[in-house]
Image (cartoon, rainbow, N blue to C red):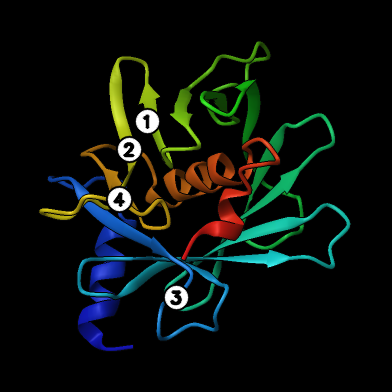
Amino acid sequence: MLEAEVEDAENLAMAHWPIPVDLFVSKKHPSLPRGLLAFADSSGNILFRLNSLSHHPKKTLRILDSAGNPLISIYRHHDGSWQGFKGDDGQKDLIFQVQRVSNKFARTELEVFLVAENHRGELTCDFKVKGCHFQRSCTIYNRDSIVAQTSLMHKLRQIYVSRRKIQLTMFPSFVDPALIVAVVVIFLVNGPKKSKILDKLP
């Protein structure tokens, strides 16, 4: 990786950025084997990627940085809830939990609970995710503030908009970008069975 690309990744990994950042989600990035989900910037530099450990009994998903280092490991439970742990799949440092509130073809809602913010006992929702799987769109809220949004890739004079191309916009915030990516991944794989969004991404 070029020095400039490393610097870009390090800058994005900081807890705060002054302007909205757009990432583009694809399974066809030229520098990755086909089928691996990549989150790249406008220059095509990979900042995050998703690996699925299909052999793991809990169907582990791992968010990796540009160098392939594991940032967050995600586990899905039978009741539809999710847990995210720091780093590899050791299940030692729990970061967040996600509960599904509604899961319909036209509407999905998730609630995200940060462990660090809920250490005093009673769980309080830190983020809410509301979206539509058919439109490949969701919005992540922190109380009344929008943290991030996904949307389809619209082009000028384009009549038909492909639902295989997704843009993730992260707004100025103190939220860890890797956490946002992890929540977006959970939204994508948490839809109704008939939609199979992650399988249909480019």
- Residue 25: quarter of image: bottom left
Camera-side residue: 155 or 47?
A: 155
In space, the residues marked 4 and 3 are separated at their CA atoms by 18 Å
Q: Which mark is residue 161?
A: 4
Mark nearest the camera among 2 and 4 is 4
**Residue sticking out furthest to the front:** 159
Image depth: mark 4 or mark 3 in front: 4
State which quarter of the image contains the N terminus.
bottom left
Of all residues, the one furthest to the top in this rendering is 122
Q: Which residue is mark 1?
A: 139
* Image mark for residue 151: none
Q: CA distance from mark 2 to mark 4?
A: 18 Å
When the figure is inspected, residue 63 is found, relative to residue 67, above or below; the finding is: above
> Which of the two discs, 2 and 3, labels the residue nearer the N terminus?
3
Q: Earlier in the sequence, mark 4 or mark 3?
A: 3
**Residue located farthest toward the right when viewing the structure as drawn:** 57
As displayed, is residue 188 above or below residue 202? above
| x then y, percent, for residue 110 | 56, 25
Q: CA distance from mark 1 to mark 3?
A: 24 Å
Q: Which label's residue is closer to the chain start, 1 or 2?
A: 1
The circle on residue 28 is 3
Q: Are marks 1 and 2 in contact (CB under 8 Å)?
A: yes
Q: Give x and y (percent) for residue 183.
A: 51, 41
- Any mark on residue 149, and which? 2
What amino acid does circle 1 point to? Thr
- Residue at coordinates 54% horizontally, 80% vertically from top-left? 34
Q: Residue drawn at (21%, 39%), measured in percent from left and top?
A: 172
Q: Nearer the viewer, mark 1 or mark 3?
A: 3
Relative to 68, 174 lies left or right: left
Is disc 4 surrounded by few (<14), some (14 to 19) or many (20+) residues within 10 Å? few
